[in-house]
Structures are given as structure tokens and as C-alpha cells.
Image (cartoon, rainbow, N blue to C red):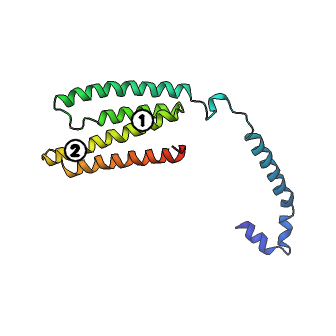
Amino acid sequence: MVLAAVWTSSPNPCHYLKPMKFVIPSALVVAAVFLTWSSSDSRSAADDPEEPNPKVVALLEEIVEVRERMAEGYLLRWKAGEETRPHAAAIALAKARLDLARERRDEAEVMELLETIVGLHEKDVAIQREAFRGGRRTGGEINRSEIGLLRARVRLEKERAQTGR
């Protein structure tokens, strides 16, 4: 507001901008030097996107171990009639293994696991439809299973498009 009052009351409003003609080019030079310096290859091996992060790999391996134990327990409960979706734990385990394969940059295993996940979702949908026909499931449960299958197919197709397989 004060600048506006000074600007309009001055006989030569551009008089106040003359000192700025050296500031703007100087700022551009500083920015260019900074960007050049910061983009130089000063990253460590841990920051290299081509190398898996060992800490992340170790954590993902722990998740896979936990998911394996959960899948065993889930399968026992399903056989006892306590669980309704026998492939849910297997899908969760396959997704944990997929995360680990992606972190390890293992493209072949990623594709194999995506195909496995699609197959597990297809089996889940078939079981849900059969249970629906028998009056043991609702349409909403089938819809959730079908959405899971469609999402798995989307992830598989995206990966195929990226890798050209």
C-alpha cells in the first residue's frame, strides 16, 4: 500500500526500479549455479534408484515372513469353516512378495507374482459366486471380489506396458 502511494506520487515511477536491474540477473546466476551444483552426481550408493535399499529389503522380508504365518493360520481356519475367503491370505502374501520383488528390482519375479495375484483373485471370484448361488454370500461380497480381480488385472497390464512383456 505504501509502495503504491510512493509509486503513484513519484514523478518518475521507474526511478525506484533502477536498482532492481542488477538484482534480478544476480539472482538468476545464483539460481543457475545452485541448480548445476545440486544436480551433479553427488549421491551416495544408497540413494541410487538402481540399487535396492538393504534396510527396506530387510523390512519387506520381515513382512513376507509375517504374511506367511498369517496365511498358514488363515488356511487352518478356513478348513475349520471359520473363514469365508480361502484366497484372501494368499493374495496378501503374494502382494507382500511383490513389494519385495519390486524393491529388489526383479522384473521376472514381479511379472510372475502379478500373474499369480490375478489367478488367486479369479479363484476367489469363482468361490464367491458359487457361495452366492448357495445362498451363503451377498452380491456385495461378489462385487468386492470382482473389483479386486479387476484391479489386479490393471496392475498386471500396466506392468506389461512398462516392461514390454
Kind of residue sitting beneath label 1 = Leu
- SS of the residue under disc 2: helix
For the N terminus, give its image quadrant. bottom right
- Corner quadrant of residue 93: top left
- Corner quadrant of residue 75: top left
Taking the image as shown, residue 71 lies to the left or right of residue 156, namely left
Q: How many marks?
A: 2
- SS of the residue under disc 1: helix
Q: Residue 162 at what x, y percent from top left?
A: 53, 46
Residue occupying image coordinates x 57% and y 30% = 52
Q: Residue 24 at what x, y percent from top left?
A: 81, 57
Choose between 96 and 108: the one closer to the eye: 108
**Compared with residue 59, is residue 110 higher up or lower down, i.e. above or below?**
below
**Compared with residue 52, is residue 130 higher up or lower down, i.e. above or below?**
below
Choose between 48 and 18: the one closer to the eye: 48
Q: Which residue is mark 2?
A: 128
| Distance of label 1 from label 2 (alpha carbons) | 22 Å
Of the residues under marks 1 and 2, which one precedes in the sequence?
A: 1
Residue occupying image coordinates x 35% and y 26% = 68
Q: Which residue is mark 1?
A: 113
Q: Residue 89 at what x, y percent from top left?
A: 31, 33
Kind of residue sitting beneath label 2 = Gln
**Compared with residue 122, is residue 92 higher up or lower down, i.e. above or below?**
above
Choose between 69 and 102: the one closer to the eye: 102
Residue occupying image coordinates x 49% and y 44% = 159
